[in-house]
Image (cartoon, rainbow, N blue to C red):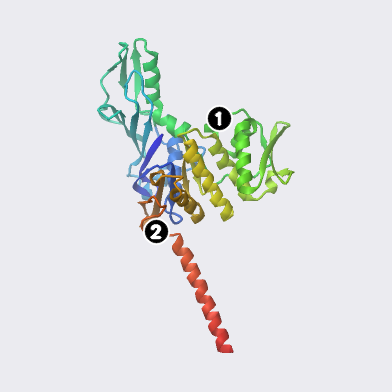
Amino acid sequence: MLKEISLKNFKIFEKASFELGRITVLVGPGGSGKSSVLDALSVLAQSGGREGLMLDGPRVKGVHYEDIVHKHEERRVVGFGVKTQLDLPVPGVSDAPSHTLDYLIAFDKDGFREHRATFSFGDGSFRLEFVTPRIGKEVLPPPLRAKSGAVATFDRSTYTLLPFQFAIRGEDPALQRSMHWLWGEALTFLVGLVDIVPSQRVLTENDYPEQALGGKGAWRSAGDMVNELAYRWDMRDKVSDWLGLLAQRKIGFVKAGGAIRVEAASTGVRRPITLEGEGVRQLIWPLAALAAADPGSLVAVEEPEIHLHPQAQAKFASLMVELAAKEGKRILLTTHSEHIVMAFLTAVAKGELRPDDLAIYYLRDEAGAAVVEKLSVDEKGMIEGGLKGFFEAGLDELEGYLEALSERRGKADGEA
């Protein structure tokens, strides 16, 4: 699973890291960098297998290096890091029951600059280390000899998320499979096991062209998602049930004339989806991503509360808790909703989540650079020092309201 994300000189971040829990929540004022974390994942994923950054892709598009480098200073080097953990053996490479990957890649305005990857097996006593600079001497492990006698040799690679190349002399299918997995592990986690749900996800059409299925990882538009749901009854039924729980609606699809019509139903009446409110129409994509996610994979959702009533926000948070705790799905979200955050904290207080299952980060902008603080959650679901920027605003509003009532009463008494 993806354990940690780190950023260097990316947009508002000069340097930051985020250790992921079962549920990871990014809170803070607008412009503090919450969405930039999801943008970083998107840029890295859409650049996978390339020698440079792809800045005109399905999610982050139409930008240049000076747009994404910190404070627009082109001399800076942009870096991304990911840490992964796989609790499975790697036959032919190590008998250890688990291993981790610590991967860092850097780019400058000319493209690929360097990447480093360290695979640590078991207690870390056996490691494979790779360093590939654009210019200069690389670091490669010595040839790896398996028990079968087959030998794996390594070569440099300048491709994003692919830290090395390899060749195997001799016959050893297990070693071949294991080396192929290690070679593409970072790419697999970022492209195949992370699903990023954008804020622009409201269904705006009733009919979407019917197309060949591309799979979950190919969801680049609402149309891709609609096609997947229309043909996957198991996912469709889950999404429909969850939508009923959150918004008292069911969802259905009608295929005709090369198009797929999306319909919603309540109290037995079916109607085109665009006749529903935006709260219902924006829910379908994140619910579909959660339905499609395998255990251990990550679903990143930008502001799940968009257009939702506070009661529906709390119910959505409770659903995410259930999926994380019982089905092993992992969730990363940005939010401005105290209802969602309180639902997560309540789940900790009830024992539905452990304190370390919930990672909450508070972000703020300080002189054009993001400051990131991980908030400590205890077993009672309480945050040390309180949740910054949320309840203070509510108290200020209440105080202002009470002052207004007091002034109004004073004027009335004076007039009497």
Q: Which mark is residue 386?
A: 2
Farthest-out residue, front? 350
Specify the amino acid type for callout 1.
Gly
- Is 148 located above or below residue 180 in the figure? above
SS class of the residue under badge 2?
loop
- Is 88 located above or below residue 204 in the figure? above
Q: Residue at x 39, y 50 (%)?
A: 379
Relative to the observer, which residue lies in front, 266 or 168?
266
Locate residue 129: give its quadrant: top left
Is 197 placed left or right of 234 in the picture?
Answer: left
Quadrant where the image shows the C terminus: bottom right
SS class of the residue under badge 1?
loop
Number of residues whose C-alpha sits closer than 10 Å to that of mark 1, classed few (under 14), some (14–19) or many (20 or more): few
Residue pointed to by mark 1: 215
Number of residues whose C-alpha sits closer than 10 Å to that of mark 2, classed few (under 14), some (14–19) or many (20 or more): few
- Could you tell which of marks 1 and 2 lies nearer the N-terminus? 1
Q: Which dot, 1 or 2, sits closer to the camera?
A: 2
Relative to the observer, which residue lies in front, 12 or 282?
282
Q: Residue at x 53, y 76 (%)?
A: 404
Specify the amino acid type for callout 2.
Gly
